[in-house]
Amino acid sequence: MEKLSVRQQQVFDYISRYCTENGFCPSLADISQAMGLCASTAVAHVNALKKKKYVVSEYRIGRSLRPVDPEKPVTVLHSESGANDTAPVERRKPLLKGGDYAGRNASKN
């Protein structure tokens, strides 16, 4: 794995700590607020961590950012490129679109 800058290491440590303490991962807003960064800078650091394979996330699924454990790779089902990537992230159910669970009243036919 490539070396991280000091600030990237701080962001990575925050993500890892947050996931451990809360049982779920931080949003970009959580990261920017906790680290004192503007949103675009937080995104840039997270993208650098993804590029260097320190974290992974599932495309368009909130709070899916996960620190990588190189010893336990699994397949990410929803990557930005559309291809399957290898990374240690749990499988998540796809978001529901339409149907009774997306706001339609089930009692109406």
Image: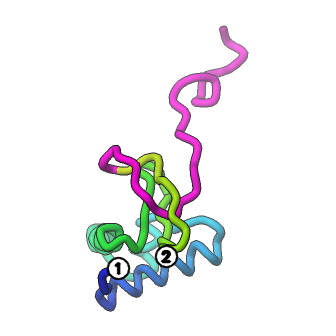
Disc 2 marks a residue whose amino acid type is Ile
Q: Position of residue 51 (x, y in %)?
A: 29, 68
Q: Is residue 89 left or right of residue 47?
A: right
The kind of secondary structure element at disc 2 is helix
Residue picked out by circle 1: 1
Quadrant in the rendering for residue 23: bottom right
Disc 1 marks a residue whose amino acid type is Met
Query: Residue shown at 66%/21% (left/top)?
Result: 105
Query: Residue shown at 37%/82% (left/top)?
Result: 36
Q: Position of residue 52 (x, y in %)?
A: 31, 73
Question: Which residue is more in the foreground, 70 or 61?
Answer: 70
Q: Is residue 82 above or below residue 106?
A: below
Q: Quadrant of the N terminus?
A: bottom left
The kind of secondary structure element at disc 1 is loop
Residue picked out by circle 2: 15
Query: Residue shown at 47%/53% (left/top)?
Result: 76
Question: Which residue is more in the foreground, 35 or 62?
Answer: 62
Q: Is residue 49 left or right of residue 18?
A: left
**First reached walking from the N terminus: tag 2 or tag 1:** 1
Quadrant in the rendering for residue 49: bottom left
Q: Residues within 10 Å of mark 2 (few under 14, many from 20)?
A: many
Question: Which residue is more in the foreground, 30 or 94?
Answer: 94
- Residue furthest bottom as drawn: 6
Q: How is the image coloured?
A: rainbow
Q: Residues within 10 Å of mark 1 (few under 14, many from 20)?
A: few
The magenta segment: 80-109
Q: Is residue 5 above or below residue 30?
A: below
Q: Is residue 101 above or below residue 95?
A: above
Marks 2 and 1 sit apart, C-alpha to C-alpha, by 18 Å
